[in-house]
Amino acid sequence: MDVLLQQVINGLVLGSMYALVALGYTMVYGIINLINFAHGEVLMIGALCSWSLINILQPAFPNLPGWVILLMAMVLASLAAASLNFAIEKIAYRPLRNAPKLAPLITAIGMSIFLQTIAMIVWKPNYKPFPTLLPATPIPIGEAVITPTQLMILGLTAVALAVLSWLVNATRLGRAMRATAENPRMASLMGVKPDMVISATFIIGAVLATLAGVMWASNYGTVHHAMGFLPGLKAFTAAVFGGIGNLGGAVVGGLLLGLIESIGSGYLGELTGGVMGSQYSDIFAFLVLILVLTLRPSGLMGERVADRA
Amino acid sequence: MLNTNALFGKRWLLASVLLLLPFVLQPFGNAWVRIADMSLLYVLLALGLNIVVGYAGLLDLGYVAFFAVGAYLFGLLASPHLTDAFPWIAAMLPNGLHLSLWMVLPMAAGVAALFGIVLGAPTLKLRGDYLAIVTLGFGEIIRVFLNNLDQPVNITNGPKGIGPIDSVSVFGHPLSKRLDLGFIELPSVTLYYYLFLVLVVVSVVVCHRLENSRIGRAWMAIREDEIAAKAMGLNTRNLKLMAFGMGATFGGISGAMFAAFQGFVSPESFSLMESVMIVAMVVLGGLGHLPGVILGAVLLAALPEALRYVAGPLQEMTGGRLDAAILRQLLISVAMVGVMLWRPSGLWPKPEHAKRLQSMEGRNA
Amino acid sequence: MLSQHVLQVAGVSKRFGGLQALNDVHLNIERGQVYGLIGPNGAGKTTFFNVITGLYPADSGSFVLADQPYQPKDVHLVAKAGIARTFQNIRLFAEMTALENVMVARHVRTHSGLLGAIFRTSNFIQEEKEITERAQELLAYVGIDTLADVKARTLSYGDQRRLEIARALATDPQLLALDEPAAGMNATEKVQLRTLIDKIRHDHRTVLLIEHDVKLVMGLCDRVTVLDEGQVIAEGTPAQVQRDPRVMQAYLGTAQA
C-alpha cells in the first residue's frame, strides 16, 4: 500500500508535467489541425536555456535563495522559448497552412530534428547535471515521501492551470482563441485575426513547455539535447487520450498517463512474472496511444477540432 | 516525341557509369566503395517507403522497423547466436544454421510483409497525422524489444547485438572473400556492390511496373482523395494494407542484405532517426517519382559520409561541436523543412506533362 | 435482362441528434430515366444522397437496386453494387491525368493484382489495354479526349465536371448519381451539361440528379421528387410538380422567411 501511495505521488508529479506539455499540443491542434512534432523540443530548449541562465545567475547573485534563481531562470527561459516558437510558427508553419496534409507534418518533424541538432551544437551532446536549487530533504506523507521539488511541480502546475483557465475564459484573447478553435472562418469574419491567435497559442504553449522542461530537469537532475523527445511523445499521447483540442482533456489525460506510467512500471515486473521490467515503461505511452486511437479515437473527454467546412 | 536514340544513349551511359563505379572509387580506398554499397541499400529502403508514402500517401515514420526485421531475421538464421543461446537448437543443428541467399531473400521479404500487415491492420484507418505518430510508436516499440529481449529468453542479445553474421554466397562464392578472376581481383566490397546493384535494378523495375498498373493507380487515387476513391469502388483498406506490405518487403530485403554486409546487427542501427532519414530521402527527391527518390536516397546517404572528410577540419574549428553525425542530422532536417517550404514536389519531381503511359504499346505518337 | 426498376427506396429516415433530417422518404427510379430530386435548402437532398451512397447509415428504410436488395453500408461497395456518384465540390484525383482518373474508376470491374502487375502477365496486359481503351472512349464521350494527358487539377471547371462524369460512368453503373452537377456553371456550360445528360439518357443510362437550378431540372428530368424538411411533398413529372401548391408553398414560403 505504501508503495502504491508513492507511485501515485510520483505519477501525479509526472502527470502534471505531461499535462503542461499536452496543453501546448492540444491548443495548436485545436486551432490549426497540426501535430507540432517539434513541441517536445521546445521543452528541451526551455530547459537548456534555463540551465545556461542559472549558470550565469548563480555566480552573479550569490546571496539569492535557490528558488528565486530558479524562478528567474524560468521566466527568462520562457521568454526565449516563446520567441523561438513564435518564429518557428511564422517561418515554417504559416506558409504551409493551406498545403496538402503531408507537408506541415514533414516540416514539423524536420523542425524537431533541426532543434535537437542545434541544441547539440550549441550545448554539446553530453548529459549535464541540473543544479539543485531547492532543498533536497523529502517530506514524509504517510508511508511515502515527497520532495520539495515535487511539491513545487504540483504547485506550479496548479498555478499555471489557473492562469491559463483565466486567460482562456475571461480575457479577450481567450475568447478569440476559443472562437478560432471552433470555427476559424466565422471568427475571422467577426474581426479576429487568425495569425495573431495562432501566434498567441504557440507562445502560450512554449511558456507551458518551458515550465515543464525546467521542472523535469529539476526533478530528474539532468538536461541534454534529447530530453524532449520522449516526454513530447507521451504528452501528445496524453492530449489524444483526453481528447485532442480539449483543454480539460489534456490535463486529465496528462495526469492519468502519468499515473498509468508510474503505477504500471512499478508493477510491470510482478504482472509479467519477471519477463518485462521497468525498462519497458517507455512503450506504455505508445500502447496507450495505439489503444486509444483504435478503440476510442475521440479520447476520454471528446475532441474539439476546428470546423473546417 | 522522344528521340529514342538519345534515350538509348542516355541509358547506356548510365549503365556504364553504374557498372564501372567501383573501379573508379577503388583507388581512393575501400571506404568509398562501402559508401556506394550503403547508398544502394538506402536506395532500396527509399524505393520501398516510396510505395507507402509516395504512391499511397501514407506517412510511415516507423519504416525502420521492417529494416530491423529483415536484418535480425538474417542475423538469427545465419550466425552462431541461436545455437549459442539455445543448446537445444545447437543439438538439432550440429553444423550451425547457415542459410543461402536464395532462401534468405524470400524469407526476409515474407516476414517483413507479415509484420507490415500486422502493424497496418489496426492503424491504416487512422488519419494522416495520427498514422504518422502511431507508426513512429511501432518503430520505437520494436527497437525497445530488440534492446530488451535478452531476458528471460535471449532472442535478440539485447544491446550487444548479434554477430558474427555469415556473408551471403552467390553461386558458391561467399561475398566476404575477394574474387580472383585471373586478370582482375574483386574485393568483397565490390562484390557486394554488384549484388546490391542487381537488387536495386530489379526493385526499380518492380516499382515502375507497380506504378503503371491497376494497383498503382488505385494507390495514387487513395493518396489524392480517399473519399472519392472509395466512391469509385476502391477497397481502400485492402489497398492500403497491400501498399504497406509491399513497402515492407523492400525494407526486409534491404535489412537482410545489411546484416550480411556488416556481419553484425545491433539495435542502434534501427533508431527513429533512420526512419526519418528515409522519409527525408523520399520527400527531398520527389514523392512518387522514381528517379527523384533514387536521387534523394543517394544524396542523403552518400553526402554525409563524404562530409566526414570535411567534418574533420570543421570539428577542430568548432571545438568538437560539429562532427559527421551532427552534420548529417543538420542536413536531413534542413532538407525536410527547406523542401516543404520552397520546393514541395522535391528536387526531381514528375514532369508536368505526363509522358504517355509506358505500358501501352501501339498507341500513336 | 436489365431490370425495369433501377432504384426503389422506401421508408428512409435519418435523425441527427435533435434534427429529423429524413422522414419516411421514398423514391422509384425506372431504367433510362433522368430523375430529379429537388427542394429548398436544408430539405435533406444531400442527406438522402449521402445515405444511398453509403456515407451515412439510414436509421430505417429499404433499398432495392436493380431488383436486388441493397445495403449501402460500406462506401466502397456502393460502386460495386452499381451506383456511381459525382461530388458537389468536384473530387478528382488532382495530380493524375484525366485519362488516369477514368482508368482508376475501372478498378471495380477489373481484377489484376500485384502479381500481374509485377510479372506483366498476358492477362494483365490484356486488361490494361481494355482499361485504357474504355477510358479513352469515355473521355471522348464527354468531349475531353484531347485533354487525356493533362493533370486533372489544371483542367477548366467545366472540363473537370465532365471528367467527373466520365469517371463515374467508367464504373458501369446501374445508376449515375449527380450531386449538383450544374453548381457554379454559367448558362452556356449548363446547356452543354444538359446536352450531355440527354445523351446519357439516350444511351439507356439512368440518372439521379440533385439540383438547385429548378429550371434545369424541369427541362431535363422525366420525373421529380420534391423534398421539404426531410419529407416527400410531391412527386411526378416536372409539369405536375410545378403546379403542386405544396411545392410552391415550400419554395415561396422559405423565400418569405
Image (cartoon, coloured by chain):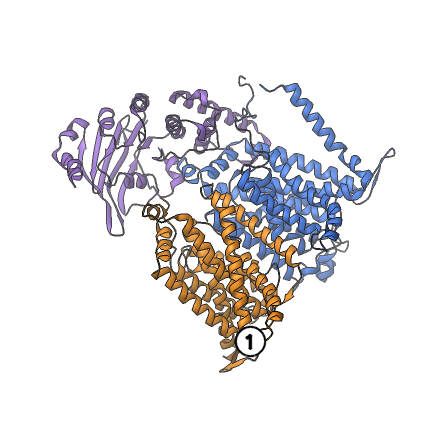
Chain colours: A orange, B blue, C purple
Q: Residue at x 41, y 58 (%)?
A: A243
Where is residue A109 shown, x and y percent of the image? 55, 49
Q: Is residue B145 left or right of residue C211?
A: right
Q: Would you name the residue on which mark 1 appears? A: A65
Where is residue A60 shown, x and y percent of the image? 61, 69
Q: Quadrant of the C terminus of chain A?
A: top left
- Of residues C26 and A34, the one drawn nearer to the viewer in this rendering: A34
Quarter-of-image position of residue C42: top left
Residue lying at the far top in this picture: please name it.
B364
Is any part of residue B248 visible from this angle? Answer: no
| Position above or below: B232 against B74 | above
- Of residues A201 and B156, the one drawn nearer to the viewer in this rendering: A201
Is any part of residue A250 visible from this angle? Answer: yes
Q: What is the three-letter code of the residue carrying label 1?
A: Pro
Q: Is residue A91 left or right of residue A168?
A: right
Where is residue B307 shown, x and y percent of the image? 72, 45
